[in-house]
Image (cartoon, rainbow, N blue to C red):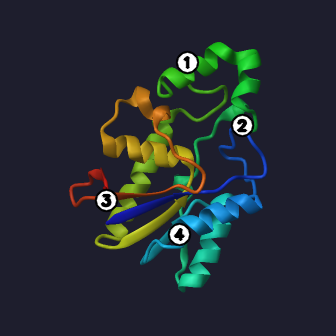
Amino acid sequence: MILDLLRHGETEQGGLRGSLDDALTDKGWAQMRSAVAAAGPWQVLVSSPLQRCARFADELGAQLNLSVQREPALQELHFGDWEGRSAAQIMQDQADELGRFWADPYAFTPPNGEPVAVFAQRVLAAVERLGRQHAGKRVLLVTHGGVMRLLLAQARGLPREQLLQVEVGHGALLRLVLGDDGQLLEAR
């Protein structure tokens, strides 16, 4: 399966969005439209159910005459008490905790947040399911920065401590290949 990953564009609110269901800005819509303008064709469209992904996926699906498969397991990491806050805001009262999270997100969970190990398990299981459902097809997954970082880190064989060093901008479109053996590889 060829798995193209599209990160949602800029949202109306800043900071860590996680499970918050924000809308895209006009710039965010433009980022996503630009990313897919010369890409494709896809046989399958899959989206996080959060509106910053799903509304664009619905628009694209209508243009391509494809239904959109919603996949709740491919939502962003839940950042708990940090949701809606910027890194600068978190640094004001939880600098040590934020530093620990950046250094090894698997070893430190934001207060009342989702452990990265649990997040990784749900995302990887969902991609495995997609691989079985859509073997041999070209799939566009409209998702979040954290999901893309995780999948790219897996494909690149990075140690878990380097997860947050993977760069994924708003509207980024990247390609992975899911092999028959379940291994993710980054397409060049």
In the displayed structure, would residue 137 be above or below residue 89?
Answer: below
Instruction: Determine whether the residue tagged by mark 1 lies in a helix, strand or loop.
Output: helix
Q: What amino acid does circle 2 point to?
A: Glu
Is residue 9 left or right of 102 when viewed as pictured?
right
Q: Name the residue under label 4.
A: 36
Q: Which of marks 1 and 2 is nearer the N terminus?
A: 2
Does the CB distance between marks 4 and 3 fall below 8 Å? no
Numbered badge on residue 83: 2
Q: Earlier in the sequence, mark 3 or mark 2?
A: 2
Residue visible at 53% across and 69% down in the picture: 36
In the displayed structure, would residue 72 be above or below residue 64?
Answer: above
Residue 177: x and y in percent read: 31, 59
Q: How far apart are marks 3 and 2 (CA)?
A: 32 Å
Q: Which of marks 3 and 1 is nearer the N terminus?
A: 1
Q: What amino acid does circle 4 point to?
A: Val
Q: Earlier in the sequence, mark 4 or mark 2?
A: 4
Residue visible at 72% across and 47% down in the picture: 20
Does the CB distance between marks 3 and 2 fall below 8 Å? no
Q: Earlier in the sequence, mark 4 or mark 3?
A: 4
Is residue 21 left or right of 136 when viewed as pictured?
right
* Residue 33 in which image quadrant: bottom right
Residue 108: x and y in percent read: 54, 22
Is 182 or 58 nearer to us in this picture?
58
Numbered badge on residue 177: 3
Is 13 or 106 nearer to us in this picture?
13
Q: Mark 1 points at which residue?
A: 100
Instruction: Determine whether the residue tagged by mark 2 lies in a helix, strand or loop.
Output: loop
Q: Earlier in the sequence, mark 1 or mark 4?
A: 4
Does the CB distance between marks 1 and 4 fall below 8 Å? no
Does the CB distance between marks 3 and 1 fall below 8 Å? no
Numbered badge on residue 41: none
Q: What amino acid does circle 1 point to?
A: Arg
